[in-house]
């Protein structure tokens, strides 16, 4: 510690040096000793660091904000994930609880697929399935449809009645099937997701919610299944209902681009326009999730993000990661 006597001794030693210069030297010495003491006491660069940790955290936050602001989207929540590494390349409110609308049917389909022994098996639609609203064509009670065609109807044309029919065929009841959906969500790490139905309805199911991050993880899991991947990448197909052939078209209009390979659209008045995409452009395989966007903005949001992320170097450190930060063939789940 610097005392009055210490100052006097220092002043005596500096008697042949101009007084101002001597004082400056003493102040510099004190500052240096204080800095050394601070580093020793706090553990410079360690747990109690006052400088390095705070600086890195601030720089990371600023860099993330600047990077995200380089591309604007209408969506209230969105995320872009590298399919091969699980690294998050861009995000906007990725952990905000949102209504997923018909992107719910991804989980409906994968749970059904994993519990169906014979996809060609024909089942009869129930009164509940036939009465489910907001479907592109009518399924009447007692209609005979194969399980595979129900999967196609649910994933390609987003048929709500088909989703209910799948649930009842697999579990005997919709409630039991929803239990399997929530169990699967937890198994694959979608901890902030809670399903209340297999369709994505939310007007009477206020707790039916997920997040952009969870939906990306669910998508990555679903795409490991060959049947799921084949169906969601199909632009046009046909199914047979009660012996009658019906043509169906994919609600995902971005499949017109050769680099878009699926996955699912969604819309309710509450959820607004939602979209989950799997793309492979320039060797970059991406999962893009768009939630609560506008009618005009949902597709452009996705395309803008795919384009922007594609211009970045694959070696750029991720904002957050499901798995390893280096390129690896090992999946994050």
Image (tube, rainbow, N blue to C red):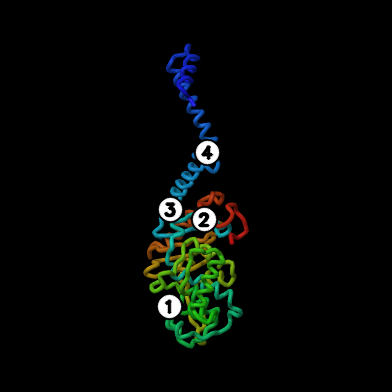
Q: Count the numbered circles shown.
A: 4
Name the residue carrying label 4.
Answer: 42
Task: State how far apart marks 1 and 2 are (Cα).
Answer: 35 Å
Q: Nearer the viewer, residue 185 or 140?
A: 185
**Is residue 162 visible in the rendered structure shown here?**
no
SS at badge 2:
strand
Query: Crowding at label 2, few (<14), some or many (≥20) Cα neighbours within 10 Å?
Result: many
Q: Quadrant of residue 121?
A: bottom right
Q: CA distance from mark 1 to mark 4?
A: 66 Å
Q: Which residue is mark 1?
A: 136
- Judged from the image, the secondary structure of the residue bearing numbered disc 1 is loop
Callout 1–callout 4 Cβ contact below 8 Å: no
Mark in the foreground, 1 or 2: 2
Mark 3, residue position: 71
Q: Badge 4: how crowded within 10 Å, few (<14), some, or many (20+)?
A: some
Q: Is residue 12 visible?
A: yes
Marks 3 and 2: in contact by CB < 8 Å? Answer: no
Identity of the residue furthest to the top in this view? 16
* Mark 2 or 3, closer to the camera: 2
Q: Which is nearer the eye, 124 or 6?
A: 6
Real-space CA distance between mark 3 and mark 4, rounded to the nearest whole angstrom:
40 Å
Q: Position of residue 14 (x, y in %)?
A: 48, 15
Rounded to the nearest angstrom, the CA distance separating label 2 from label 3 is 15 Å
* Mark toward the start of the polypeptide (1 vs 4): 4
Quarter of the image for residue 116 reads bottom right
The residue depicted at 49 percent of the width and 39 percent of the height is 51
- Of callouts 1 and 2, the N-terminal one: 2
Q: CA distance from mark 4 to mark 2?
A: 34 Å
Q: Look at the picture and state if 263 lies above or below 127.
A: above
- Disc on the earlier residue, 2 or 3: 3
Q: Is residue 301 left or right of residue 219?
A: left
């Amino acid at each position: 510690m610097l005392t009055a006597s210490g100052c006097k001794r220092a002043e005596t030693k500096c008697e042949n040096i101009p007084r101002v210069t001597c004082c400056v030297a003493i102040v510099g010495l004190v500052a240096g000793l204080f800095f050394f003491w601070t580093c020793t006491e706090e553990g410079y660069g360690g747990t109690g660091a006052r400088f390095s940790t705070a600086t890195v955290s601030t720089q990371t936050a600023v860099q993330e904000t600047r990077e995200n602001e380089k591309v604007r989207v209408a969506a209230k929540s969105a995320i872009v994930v590298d399919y091969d590494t699980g690294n998050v390349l861009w995000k906007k409110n990725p952990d905000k609880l949102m209504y997923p609308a018909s992107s719910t049917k991804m989980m409906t389909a994968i749970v059904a697929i994993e519990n169906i022994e014979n996809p060609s098996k024909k089942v009869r639609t129930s009164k509940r399935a036939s009465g489910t609203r907001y479907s592109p064509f009518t399924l009447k009670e007692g209609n005979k449809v194969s399980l595979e065609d129900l999967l196609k109807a649910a994933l390609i044309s987003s048929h709500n009645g088909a989703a209910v029919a799948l649930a009842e065929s697999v579990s005997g009841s919709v409630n039991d099937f929803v239990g399997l959906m929530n169990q699967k969500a937890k198994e694959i790490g979608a901890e902030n997701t809670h399903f209340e139905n297999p369709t994505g309805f939310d007007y009477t199911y206020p707790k039916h919610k997920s997040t952009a991050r969870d939906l990306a993880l669910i998508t990555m899991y679903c795409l490991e299944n060959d049947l799921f991947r084949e169906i969601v990448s199909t632009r046009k197909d046909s199914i047979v209902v009660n012996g009658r052939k019906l043509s169906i078209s994919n609600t995902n209009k971005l499949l017109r681009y050769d680099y878009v390979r699926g996955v699912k659209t969604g819309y309710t008045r509450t959820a607004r326009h939602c979209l989950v995409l799997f793309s492979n452009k320039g060797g970059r395989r991406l999962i893009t999730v768009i939630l609560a966007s506008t009618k005009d903005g949902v597709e452009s949001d996705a395309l803008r993000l795919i384009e922007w992320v594609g211009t970045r170097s694959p070696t750029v450190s991720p904002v957050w990661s499901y798995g390893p930060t280096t390129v690896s063939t090992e999946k994050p789940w």
